Amino acid sequence: MKAPQPIDRFEIRLSGLGGQGLITLGRLLGSALALGHGYYVTQTQSYGPEARGGSSRADVVVSSRPISYPKTENLDLLVALSPEACNSYYRLLKKTGILLVDTTLVKHAPTNVYLGLPFTQMAKEQIGNPMTINTMVMGAVTHLLPFADPRVMRKSLEANLPAKIREVNAKAFALGLKQAQRHFGDAGGIWAAAEESGSHAEDDIIV
Amino acid sequence: MSVQRKKRKRRELFALGNEAVAEGALLAGCSFYAGYPITPSTEIMEVMANRLPLIEDGVFIQMEDEIASMGATIGASLAGRKAMTATSGPGFALMQEHIGYACMVEAPLVVVNVMRGGPSTGLPTSPAQADVQMARWGTHGDHPIIVLSASNVQECLEMTVTAFNFAEKYRTPVILLLDEVTAHTREKITVPDPDEVEILSRVEPTVPPEWFKPYADTARGVPAMAPIGSGYRTHVTGLTHDVMGYPTQRPDEVKDAMLRLFRKIDQYYGDIQMADEYMLDDAEVAVVAYGSVARSAHLAVEQARERGAKAGLLTLKTLFPFPRPAVERLTHRCHTVVVPEMNMGQMSREVKRVNNGRTKVRTINRVDGQIITPSEILKAIL
């Protein structure tokens, strides 16, 4: 295992609808970062008393130091797979944070500075299984996290899934990763751009 | 060198608080679980259902309700097993009568209560810390009891082991109070090698069966315990009993029995009362917290220090018997003690009692099913 690179509280929220597999995604992502990469990770969740439907979210905090508060307060990365989730949590995003949406479901993002891929459509048409949306998102998120090694993420994903669904999810992960690489460009560049637009936003307020 | 060191078998897991509780229970030697599933405690039961059938003589039973679950747990304990059940508020309410029975017959066992919003069905999937006084006083009659708490996933494992050790050492039910946030947070934990962990078990009689007095006083106040069916004659009743275990109303025998129940816990306060100190040496403002809120408080104290405020944190790991000495020290040294909790003031009541008007006690209370955030605590510190 490579020594983890220093990170001080990187906060991710995975939000959307019950049934999209967000809590599973949180567990897979957290497990890969904690056990695969050796970071400190806390993964928490929030869901309603309904069995399905309703809103659902999982929060992941990553740090190279022990984490005290396990939940999120200022998001570095918000993944929104439903318009409701996008609208309710957008305000928690840091000025320099990144918003990633499912463009099949989120037609009108509350900002024009965001990244998007049609995850639902891709899962249905290219993988043939809409349930793989969460592992496809994991592929895209892996590309966006400068401290995540795609090979380690993929290995951990495969280790955590039952044999029956391993192959289809590995395929979805690879597709999410590939599309993110193609459409979003280099992860370092994305964060540098977010940093810059964030600092401009601050200037605007002062002026 | 001929000395061979056995390689320690530690396991790293990315686990829920609830899963860590189950790992801790199995590590402590728990071989019996009876329960009824309820959110947010269900994962404890799920892991036990998977794992107990794999160990020798392991028994897992899903009972018809929480009353029966507690009854089965007591029965297993009296028959010599290390036994546990887990539930949440509504189920914990049903268990209260039998918890009193366990206190009276001195059955070592562990009850985990993962607190959710109440009263009644309340908020099944949201956190609260509103069963704190219920854990202490929920069953009727004057009784001592041990109530523990955990604030992170590794601690869930460690405190479950501690809960079993205290139960066995003091022959008493031990209640482990978690909240939904701690129970449903996933973190990396290390499950230690069984050889690395101190595991205590009840003292069994060494005298011949005809000399055995099942409730005889000892220096520790804890009678030796013979498993039912082992050839030692044991009588078990919820009625106040004499040293032979038979009902008595003689004031001298009743007094001896009751005072011994208290003494066996009272004289080991130093062993039982556990609290973690963080940045308290020069603190002028101290936060007293427990469970998941202690984690918010930890970040708030860090942030306060960055801004130059002399803040510190006392995390209570034992809630009852209330860790009086640790809290009392703070009330002498600090100008303010802040007590954040997800209820209307159940622990701050204890802090105020110990404080006795000495210093300022500020409370932060939240009953909307949300965890208290670091910024709320920071505001109260500054």
Image (cartoon, rainbow, N blue to C red):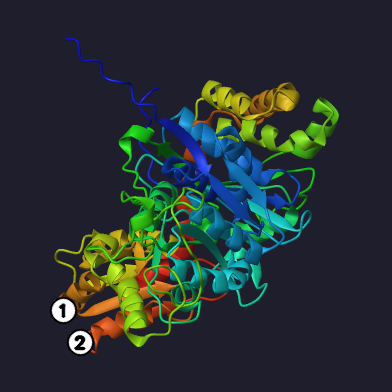
Asked if residue B55 can be seen in this view, the reply is yes
**Chain of the residue displaying label 1:** B
Q: Please name whichever residue, B293 or A117, is drawn nearer the observer in this view of the structure.
A: B293
Location of residue A184 in the rendering, given as x and y in whole percent from the top left corner: 62, 32
- Dividing the image into 4 quarters, which one contains the C terminus of chain B? bottom left
| Residue that mark 2 sits on | B358
B382 w.r.t. B204: above or below: below
Q: Are marks 1 and 2 in contact (CB under 8 Å)?
A: yes
User: Mark 2: which secondary structure?
Assistant: loop
Q: Distance between the residues labelled 1 and 2?
A: 7 Å
B110 w.r.t. B359: above or below: above
Residue occupying image coordinates x 39% and y 55%: B225
Mark 2, other Cα within 10 Å: few <14 / some 14–19 / many ≥20: some
Q: Is residue B79 left or right of residue A181?
A: left
| Residue that mark 1 sits on | B332
Amino acid type of the residue tagged 2 in the rendering: Arg
- The answer to which image quadrant residue B222 occupies is bottom left
**Chain of the residue displaying label 2:** B
Location of residue B100 in the rendering, given as x and y in whole percent from the top left corner: 50, 73
